[in-house]
Image (tube, grey):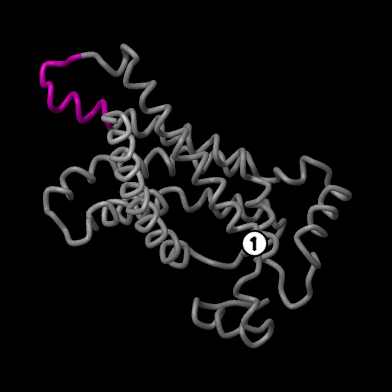
Amino acid sequence: MSPIYSGTLNTLKHILRTEGLTGLWKGNIPAELLYLAYGSVQFSTYRLTSRYLSTLPLFRRAGPHPRTQKETRDAAISFVAGAFAGTVATTATYPLDLLRTRFAAQGSERVYASLLASVREITRHEGIPGFFRGLSAGVTGIVPYMGLFFAVYETLKLPLAELELPFGSSDAVAGTVASVTAKTVVYPLDTVRKRLQVQGPTRGGLGVSLIKAAPASAVTMWTYERAMGVMLAWNRGGEEL
């Protein structure tokens, strides 16, 4: 049986032809809620975990080469904190991720009439566990993904900052490289997660995933660093008063 979708451009044309322009935004509401909730949980958990790990004797041990030892320690802290933050955020927001995937997987024949209807249908036919279908695969994938992402990002952030790129884009570049590296390594696990969520073949590929993930991570990390800078400056100003 020939595939329904073949290539990004053909897929775009097919969706526009059979489902109209609104078809490109299927699952957008749960996706927006997911991004807001996920980002909040992820970054707050990451910062708290990083601070806690840096106080542990395991990560404070001095070595014969202090600079190399510090770089290795910082990378290890970033990996562990990132993996833990990703696990917590994924588990807390997984039902929204599942809803987003199922809405996006619907074709011209709609399975769920609305967001509220989808919640009722899943609850009635699958129970509460239905909202967490594929969670184990999601967590299995997010541990190496977020661990690698933050480890690569924190490793590249300071060296790239010395280049003095315009508009503070060094954070965006570091985020892009970190995202592409991490996404490429763990993409097979992401495929397994999506197939468990929809219980059928998901049609897509690594290329499409990178096109989405790379700019999203660039914008996210640039915004995160700018926001943290503003809040830290505001906090210092309050302490001086």
Magenta-colored span: 62-74
Q: What residue lies at 42% left-to-right and 27% top-to-bottom?
A: 49
Residue 87 in magenta stretch? no
Question: What residue sits right under mark 1 in the picture?
Answer: 29
Q: Is residue 95 left or right of residue 122?
A: left
Is residue 66 inside the magenta stretch? yes
Disc 1 packing (10 Å; few <14; some 14–19; many ≥20) = some
Residue 55, quarter of picture: top left
218 shown above or below 94: below
Q: Residue 132: x and y, percent?
A: 70, 43
- Counting every numbered tag in the picture gives 1
**Residue shown at the point (23%, 45%) measured from the top left:** 157
Task: Place residue 90 in its image quadrant.
Answer: top right
Say which amino acid is labelled 1.
Answer: Ile
Q: Main secondary structure of the magenta part?
A: helix
Q: Relative to 53, does residue 106 appear above or below in the rendering?
A: below
On the rendered image, what quadrant is the N terminus found in? bottom right
User: Residue 152, how many percent across, how many down?
Assistant: 29, 43
Where is residue 38 drawn, in percent x and y?
A: 54, 45
Q: What is the residue that sits farthest to the top in this orientation? A: 57
Q: Is residue 99 left or right of residue 79?
A: right
Q: Quadrant of the C terminus?
A: top left
Furthest-right residue in view?
A: 124
Secondary element under disc 1, as helix, strand or loop, is: helix
Q: Residue at x 78, y 75 (%)?
A: 109
Measured from the top left, where is residue 223 in percent x and y?
A: 36, 53
Q: Residue furthest bottom?
A: 17
